[in-house]
Image (cartoon, rainbow, N blue to C red):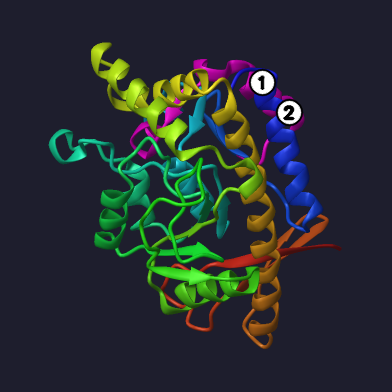
Amino acid sequence: MPYPQNLETAKEVEAIVRQNGAIPATIAILDGMPCVGLSLEELERLAILGRKARKTARRDIAHVVATGGNGATTVSATMFFAAKVGIAIFVTGGIGGVHRHGESTLDISSDLTELGRTPVAVVSAGVKSILDIPRTLEYLETQGVCVAAYQTNEFPAFFTEKSGCTAPSRVDSPEDCARLIDSSINLGLMTGILIALPIPREHSASGNIIESAIQKALKEAREQNVTGSAETPFLLARVSELTGGTSLASNIALVKNNARLGAQIAVSLCQLRDHSCKGRTTFLVGLIGFKFLYIPSTRNFLYHPTSGYLMEKKG
């Protein structure tokens, strides 16, 4: 997404999160420093950098930090940092997956393995439609990842509402999603959850038009030998060009829609934990002028990594 459209979209997405009662924390690496929550100045700097910021998956984190670089984090890296600071819900446009012809190239996004080992719920419009959706769902099953479609029985396909694949599970409200996340945490499954929200119908692109553009973009990528981490940005950019910007408009609309639901789930999860955590042990960490109350989300917190949340009080 070009500047300044990327900046305006990021600001609008953060505003939607706040309007729905949650707190946004955009994640990136700036000058070798992992940042969870960006100021307006940092957000603008990242937007201006655009593709000059390194596309940073989990494997790249240490190198970007060690070299003092700037990183735009993928789903896998963002999940890693979110889990480190106790953020339970992460919103994105669409996750990576098994690339088309991945059975021979073995080009499989680290987003999928991260979902299999990091307990963060990801709200997305499904898997990017430039990828192999059926094989991606099979791989997520292998990783033990709970996949639930929102208010539908069919897994969405990013730019379009339907992929032709049946979703393994279904949820119908933010409260359903919150209970699912809470149960996963309490059971100690230590895996992520993928909540797939279809793009709003009025913004859904024509499946035939999108698929035709994808096939042309894939052909160009092969001819130009575009592979690895460069392939997805190349394909998305070409699909946007080939559809006259229709896919980009759809992309922006679905990200905003995902942010709205993600914020509502976060609020529901907070309310659920507030109710379920009454009477549980509270830790107090004192700093000069402030106190932070850490409330674990389960009773069985000794000797185990435990999610919780902080309450800040002056005094």
Which of the 4 image quarters holds residue 151? bottom right
Asked if the residues shown at circle 1 and circle 2 are in contact, with their CB atoms under 8 angstroms apart, the answer is no
Q: Is residue 42 visible?
A: no
* x 58%, y 23%: residue: 245
Place of residue 152 in the rendered image (x, y in percent of width and height, measured from the top left): 51, 65
Which of the 4 image quarters holds residue 244? top right
Which quarter shows the C terminus?
bottom right
Q: Nearer the viewer, residue 184 or 258?
A: 258
Numbered mark located on residue 8 in the image: 2
Query: Is 75 part of what is drawn in magenta?
Result: no
Numbered mark located on residue 314 in the image: none
Place of residue 267 in the rendered image (x, y in percent of width and height, measured from the top left): 71, 65
The crowding category of the residue bearing disc 1, from other C-alpha atoms within 10 Å (few below 14, some 14 to 19, many at least 20), is: some
Place of residue 103 in the rendered image (x, y in percent of width and height, measured from the top left): 16, 41
Identify residue for label 1.
Answer: 45
Give the extent of the magenta segment: 36-62
Query: Height in image: 45 above or below 151?
Result: above
* Magenta-colored segment: predominant secondary structure: helix
Query: Height in image: 288 above or below 172?
Result: above
The crowding category of the residue bearing disc 2, from other C-alpha atoms within 10 Å (few below 14, some 14 to 19, many at least 20), is: some
> Which three-letter amino acid code belongs to the residue tagged 1?
Arg
Query: Height in image: 183 above or below 215?
Result: below
Give the alpha-carbon distance from disc 1 to disc 2, as whole Å: 13 Å
* x 36%, y 50%: residue: 114
Query: Height in image: 6 above or below 220?
Result: below
Q: Secondary structure at mark 1?
A: helix
Which quarter shows the N terminus?
top right
Q: Is residue 195 visible?
A: yes
